[in-house]
Image: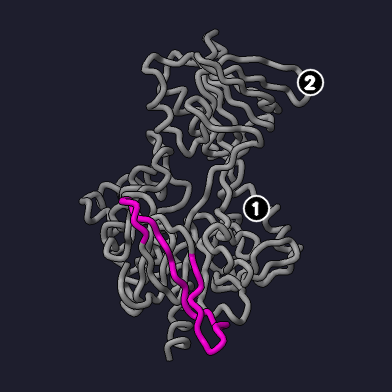
């Protein structure tokens, strides 16, 4: 791919590795390369729904918490787009999701010299050295370009930032009518142009509520059925004290805490992020449902304390069985499509690392042991660093897959890479 050995190669060019690319650009002391399988930058494009806003402050962008004077900040982006004064007058900490995506795209363009798009990483192989070949100080990264050719590059450190993969209930397979919300807008555009009669939306979190509201707005003659196991949507706890769980200092405290305390923290504060909805959106959906009851034409229907028991796809649509978990009553609906807003899972780095996984140590629960600097704990033979951007909730806390701490994390990873590079080459 390119001659010489890189100080770091990043797999993926999403927000986490973009934050790292910014740090590399600002410090200008490391040689880095980021490989992205997509042909251009994109971040949850299929959930850029009309009028949806961020759930995290714009100050927690890719750089501000690490370097408030950086010209890669969201405020610098607004200035470059000639909207800074307008945004200030808007009096909000939470920009439109479409706007934040444009900010990320703006950053990606400015660090494009570090990124190779249309490069899908296939495997990572050890580069052995030493008299007996037992020392692995470098890694070879193999990637397939869009034209089908395979290329490779060497690195002293690997940073895995492959993001999340959609989670579906057991036994559910996607199709043109059965989707995860990660593919929402694309699948919706593939539906027949004739207005659908009914959608079913499964899930109780922010994405489920947003999809429900979006479909209800977009199709004014269509019924939208929300199915969830709770009595209703639960509000996200975004109060000031609870938000301290996302502070950079909280990562330090969480990492040093005993295992039972870590579990307690995750249990206590799961309602800051998982299966919860902004209160304003909850109130809006309740208002819609109540208004329709008053007017006698109900398009928004909530099946609470319920689950989808079966989905059968036919030539003209779906047959969906919904079971009440309190009474056992079954409701059978025909639907044009069903959207599963059932969350995401981190990508297991083992799919890339191959035999190198044998050098990665795990805890008693089979999870990767991750050092404070986000580097996998490995055997002494593996001296090349392997860092995780995500998949570290068990070790570093709730910010593992969120935007809240990625600016700080990028700086900590680059600090570690720089120290180790000086040690290895010195």
The residue where tag 2 is placed is 327
x, y percentage for residue 309?
69, 25
Split into 4 quadrants, where in the image is the C terminus? bottom left
Which residue is the extreme one toward the right? 327
Q: What stretch is highlighted in magenta?
A: 124-150
> Between marks 1 and 2, how big is the CA–CA gap?
31 Å
Image height of 181 relative to 270, above or below: above
Split into 4 quadrants, where in the image is the N terminus? bottom left
Point 50% across, 62% down: residue: 389
The residue where tag 1 is placed is 269
x, y percentage for residue 266?
67, 55
Point 40% across, 63% down: residue: 19
Residue 134 located within the stretch drawn in magenta? yes
**Residue 112 can be seen in this image:** yes
10 Å crowding of disc 1: few (<14), some (14-19), many (20+): some
| Between discs 1 and 2, the one toward the N terminus | 1
Image height of 362 relative to 208, above or below: below
Which residue is the extreme one toward the top? 296
What color scheme is it? one colour
Badge 2 marks a residue whose secondary structure is: loop
Residue 181 located within the stretch drawn in magenta? no
Image height of 174 relative to 333, above or below: below
10 Å crowding of disc 2: few (<14), some (14-19), many (20+): few
Majority secondary structure of magenta residues: strand
x, y percentage for residue 6?
37, 75
Q: Is residue 73 left or right of residue 231?
A: left
- Which quarter of the picture shows residue 170? top right
Point 43% across, 46% down: residue: 54
x, y percentage for residue 394?
65, 61
Point 31% across, 57% down: residue: 108
Badge 1 marks a residue whose secondary structure is: helix
Image height of 286 relative to 88, above or below: above
């Amino acid at each position: 791919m390119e001659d010489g050995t890189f100080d770091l190669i990043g797999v993926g060019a999403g927000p986490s590795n973009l934050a790292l690319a910014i740090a590399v650009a600002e410090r200008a002391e490391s040689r880095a390369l980021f490989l992205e399988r997509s042909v251009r930058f994109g971040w949850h494009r299929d959930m850029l729904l009309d009028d949806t806003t961020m759930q995290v402050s714009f100050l927690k962008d890719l750089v501000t918490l690490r370097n408030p004077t950086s010209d890669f900040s969201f405020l610098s982006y607004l200035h470059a787009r000639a909207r800074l004064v307008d945004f200030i007058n808007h009096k909000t900490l939470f920009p439109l999701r479409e706007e934040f995506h444009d900010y990320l795209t703006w950053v990606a363009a400015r660090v494009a010299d570090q990124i190779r798009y249309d490069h899908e990483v296939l495997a990572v192989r050890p580069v052995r050295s030493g008299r007996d070949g037992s020392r692995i100080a470098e890694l070879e990264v193999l990637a397939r370009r869009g034209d089908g050719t395979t290329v490779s590059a060497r690195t002293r450190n690997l940073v895995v930032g492959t993001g999340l993969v959609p989670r579906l209930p057991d036994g559910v397979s996607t199709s043109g009518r059965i989707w995860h919300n990660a593919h929402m807008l694309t699948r919706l555009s593939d539906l027949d142009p004739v207005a659908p009669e009914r959608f079913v939306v499964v899930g109780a979190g922010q994405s489920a509520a947003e999809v429900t509201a979006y479909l209800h707005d977009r199709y004014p003659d269509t019924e939208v059925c929300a199915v969830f196991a709770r009595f209703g949507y639960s509000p996200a706890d975004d109060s000031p004290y609870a938000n301290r769980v996302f502070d950079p200092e909280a990562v330090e405290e969480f990492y040093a805490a005993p295992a039972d305390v870590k579990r307690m923290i995750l249990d206590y504060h799961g309602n800051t992020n998982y299966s919860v909805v902004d209160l304003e959106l909850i109130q809006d959906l309740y208002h819609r449902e109540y208004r329709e009851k008053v007017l006698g034409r109900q398009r928004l229907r909530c099946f609470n304390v319920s689950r989808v028991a079966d989905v059968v796809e036919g030539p003209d649509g779906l047959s969906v069985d919904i079971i009440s978990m309190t009474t056992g009553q079954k409701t059978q609906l025909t639907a044009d499509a069903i959207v599963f807003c059932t969350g995401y899972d981190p990508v297991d780095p083992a799919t890339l690392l191959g035999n190198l996984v044998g050098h990665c140590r795990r805890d008693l629960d089979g999870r990767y042991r991750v050092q404070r600097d986000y580097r996998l704990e490995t055997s002494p033979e593996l001296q090349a660093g392997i860092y995780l951007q995500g998949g570290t909730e068990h070790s570093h806390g709730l910010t593992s897959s969120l935007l809240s701490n990625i600016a700080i994390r990028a700086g900590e990873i680059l600090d570690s890479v720089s120290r180790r590079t000086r040690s290895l080459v010195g």
